[in-house]
Amino acid sequence: MSTPPQIKTKADLKRVLSSFEWEDLEVKTARNDVPKTAYETVSAFANTRGGHIVFGVEESKPGPGFEIVGVAAVDRVQNDFLSALRSPDKISVMLTTEGNILDADGKKVLVFFIPEAATADKPVHLNGELRKSWVRRGAGDSKCTEDEIRRFIRNADPRPFEAELLDEDPEKAYDPTTIKWYRTQYETKNPSDSLADKSPLEFLEHFGLVRWEGGILKPTRASILLFGTGGAFHRTLPRPVVDAQWNLWSYDSAPPDERYLDRVLSDKNLIRTWQDLAGRFADHSASRFALDPATMQRKDSPLGYTAFRESVINLLMHQDYADPRSGSIRFHPDRWVIENPGTAVVHSGRLFEPGQKPYRNSDIVMAFVRIGLSDRNSSGLRAIYGDWTRLGRAPPIVEDDRDSYQFRLTLGVEPLMTTEQIMFRAKQGFHLTPAAALALAILVQRDSIIDRELAAAVGIAGTALEKVVNELRVQVVGETFSTHEGRRVRLAPHLRELWPLATPTDMLVDPMPELSPVQVATLELLDTPRPMTEIMSALAKHKPPFVLSRADLTRLVIKPLRVAKLVGLQFKERPSSRNQRYVLTPIGAELLAVQLRDARTKT
């Protein structure tokens, strides 16, 4: 989801208005008065993810775009609007914002940023009527449905939904096999805090998963979701936890008659759901591996297992279990798509920050934390990003969709570093550290990215992030800009025009050349310094053989590789030396590694 920069200057305004409509930008004419629809937009922004309201601008007619018309009665419009935002009779919660007056070609424009309201204050409604609550959908405002209003009220309740006590018999409500497995994991992870002498109910009571009410011991909703028997679980959650499918076709293709290879429509408790999904993932993994039957952890070095585990555990922990929709996982050859009912409790940018954060289902989260399947100080996203980067894949895409009240995580198999990127970097003469080179590879694939998300994808944090961002700025490779979500990073403007993958090849003045087979073979030979005669001999013995004269080898192979800065001289200070040898440059070695990776993938 695109995010516009903060509008603080005339240049900011013109840049934003020159783009398409944003999900969090609304323009109003407002020549002399505040239009009534402006307050609907205030409610929508406050209930969704915040946004800018701009007075003195109208949509161009005909066609897309905007026209600056200016506000005539600036003081009246600004005062009336700010007064309404502080009036409980008009808006249900006092919203703090300031008007920013911009002079755009002699016309006055008023800009207001409406922040997202706290969960406890939603739904933000008008005139004291809950039915006058709005949400932002795309570039427009929509009136809340009754289900959405109930959801806002439920989420605003200070009493956690998962902590509610249920009228279930605790002696019959729990699956003993699930509790036994969980207790074994707990004892293994916490040997100094033994609870072995406690009964199953005492064990659950120790963690507040069963509580006394009126002299009766009652289960919490979280405990039934985690450990419940089939009957108790179905009464608590009358829909599947997750629908997981392993598909044989690419994500964007039409599904064949045989819709999926395998499917798990799990209506079991969360622990058993995790066990089933982990087992199926092991069965369908491209590289077969073994799971420890006691812990459901992979025994050997993981290949995508960390990303799978963190994605599934996050789905189980953070799902809104009051929502009628199930979570879903779609495994396709070209991507995984994990969707969860319920958005993040905090802005998606904060999910990449270290430290504890508020959770929707804290009792369920802590249950997984206690046995090492989650980290209390992490959202799991950094681990997912790190695993995906180690596999050489482009970073995942996180969509915290407040419009549809859904959290989506997409993990594609597109390579993070490509031949085109490396040759483009060499051609432009950039000399970047490995971390900055990874950051550049990400920037050419994204419109922009939150700086903390970039850090997670590169595998750095803190001062290392600032060093990378500064390196990108100093070499005029990247730039930063501010949004209400925080600082974002994107490719420098001149590179967005030059980057070949962003432009049809036939429109490029100087398209990126591809390496010929003999050039690739030469790069493979130069893993150690070699003289020209040795290169000629080795190419002649290559399969297929490349028989070239010294002149043709120089003209067709060595010279283009040197121009591309993929090959250099061992003795730079003596270019005409009889003992001269050719070597891979660092960027040539990087490109060769990508070539070998792609070859392994094809086989």
Image (tube, grey):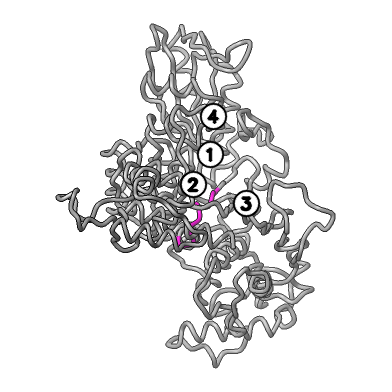
| Residue 342: image tag | 3
The residue under label 2 is 347
3 or 1: tag closer to the N-terminus = 1
578 displayed left or right of 177:
left
134 displayed left or right of 534:
right
Spatial CA distance of label 2 from label 4 is 41 Å
The residue under label 4 is 506
Residue 382 locus on image (x, y percent): 45, 59
Q: Is residue 295 at all visible to an observer of this figure?
A: yes
The residue under label 1 is 49
Residue type highlighted by circle 2: His
Q: In which quarter of the image is the C terminus?
A: bottom right
Q: In which quarter of the image is the N terminus?
A: top right
Element class at badge 1: loop
62 displayed left or right of 352:
right
Point out the residue furthest to the front here: 549
Residue 510 locus on image (x, y percent): 43, 30
Q: Residues within 10 Å of mark 1 (few under 14, many from 20)?
A: many
Point 35% across, 58% down: residue: 535
Residue type highlighted by circle 1: Arg
